[in-house]
Amino acid sequence: MPRSREDTRQHILRNAERLFAAGGYDATGVAEICRSAGVSKGAFYHHFASKHELFLELLDTWLAALDASFASAVQQAADVPTALRRMADLVAEGIRRPEVRLGLFVEFWAHAQRDPLIWERAVDPYRRYLTYFERLIGQGIEQGDFRQASPRVSAVLLTSTALGMLMQAQFVPEDEEWGETLRATVGLLLDGLREDRQ
Amino acid sequence: MPRSREDTRQHILRNAERLFAAGGYDATGVAEICRSAGVSKGAFYHHFASKHELFLELLDTWLAALDASFASAVQQAADVPTALRRMADLVAEGIRRPEVRLGLFVEFWAHAQRDPLIWERAVDPYRRYLTYFERLIGQGIEQGDFRQASPRVSAVLLTSTALGMLMQAQFVPEDEEWGETLRATVGLLLDGLREDRQ
């Protein structure tokens, strides 16, 4: 049974994602992606203007999924600490899923630093997340759940922890149960911000 | 005046470091390094077996400098929190120096994930730092400066913060005074670990 247009598109994306994560973006050519996905170059270029465009679409897909799960965590939580713990749970679950390609995350990062187009597409969401956490933590302080720490510094601490841990989980996957460690680390961090510790 | 052997070696290293950070490891050829350093290919291969060897030597040089400055911080500090704050100062000063190539750090990371030789050379020091911080924090707990948190989780939190912040400083250098932010973040983190907050 022939695949639908959208199925083909998704099939190409999943194959490219796997190849980029395994061999790197530079070393993975369009020919290899086509071979792996079992499609012609014509079909590839019907769906994507370039390998670069496909790469950026992978980034957008990731971020859209993350945004949706964060929004739902905030909506369901009674207070900010609970929301942040729930977000850590979500990322922890993500780390465990084999289809989540942490290697690709490092690839994005390495390329963003020398490709202005990738940088631009990556820096906006990054700044958006930082502002989002800054606001959330500010709200936690107002509601009396967090002590009077700088919301900005706290937000940078949170994004740094998440970024640094994703890198380590990718680097030495077998050294820790990374999902559990992420949960514990965010827990420790939130304990440090608790109002009753003031 | 002709350069000494060691000067030539260092000169090649500095040029390669700059080119790798600007254009990436893959895109930077030995020919370009030779051109930039003003040396022949013969001279290059007299000093380095390959581009790969040169890359690993840059990593070793970095780590040796970091080790030495951390050891001196611990030696001079009266207690563990002071030692950790002093280490944060050292890294903060490093971020500000233009010759510190954070881009190269991301390059190492991206390559380590698909090059077993780079991975091996990078993973040992990584595990060593983690154990080192775990022991330091354990010592801080014993001496009554830190509350009874898990030394391992606290150490992972510390390395994650440092790694994640180095990445952000490289990604959006102008968004924060990163040296100051690193200092503030580690301060916040150590506040959270303080015994009198138990």
Image (spheres, coloured by chain):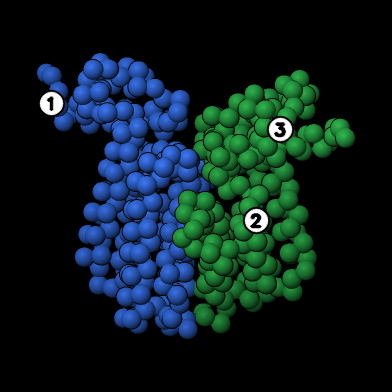
Chain colours: A blue, B green
Q: Amino acid at mark 1?
A: Ser
Q: Quadrant of the N terminus of chain B?
A: top right
Which one is closest to the eye, mark 3 or mark 1?
A: 3
**Who is closer to the viewer here, B168 or B137?**
B168
Q: Position of residue A166 (x, y in %)?
A: 45, 49
**Who is closer to the viewer here, A137 or A49?**
A49
User: Residue B48 appears in which quarter of the rendering?
Assistant: top right
Q: Amino acid at mark 2?
A: Arg
Residue visible at 41% across and 38% down in the picture: A104
The label number, if any, that marks residue B97 in the structure image: 2
**Who is closer to the viewer here, A24 or B171?**
B171
User: Which of the marked residues, 3 or 2, is nearer the chain's N terminus?
Assistant: 3
Residue visible at 33% across and 69% down in the picture: A136
Residue visible at 58% across and 48% down in the picture: B102
- Up the image or down, A11 lies above or below B99; here it is above
Residue visible at 25% across and 22% down in the picture: A44
Q: Mark 3 sits on what residue?
A: B37
Looking at the rendered structure, the secondary structure element under dot 3 is helix
Q: Position of residue B197 (x, y in %)?
A: 52, 80
**Spatial CA span between label 3 and label 2:** 21 Å
Looking at the rendered structure, the secondary structure element under dot 2 is loop
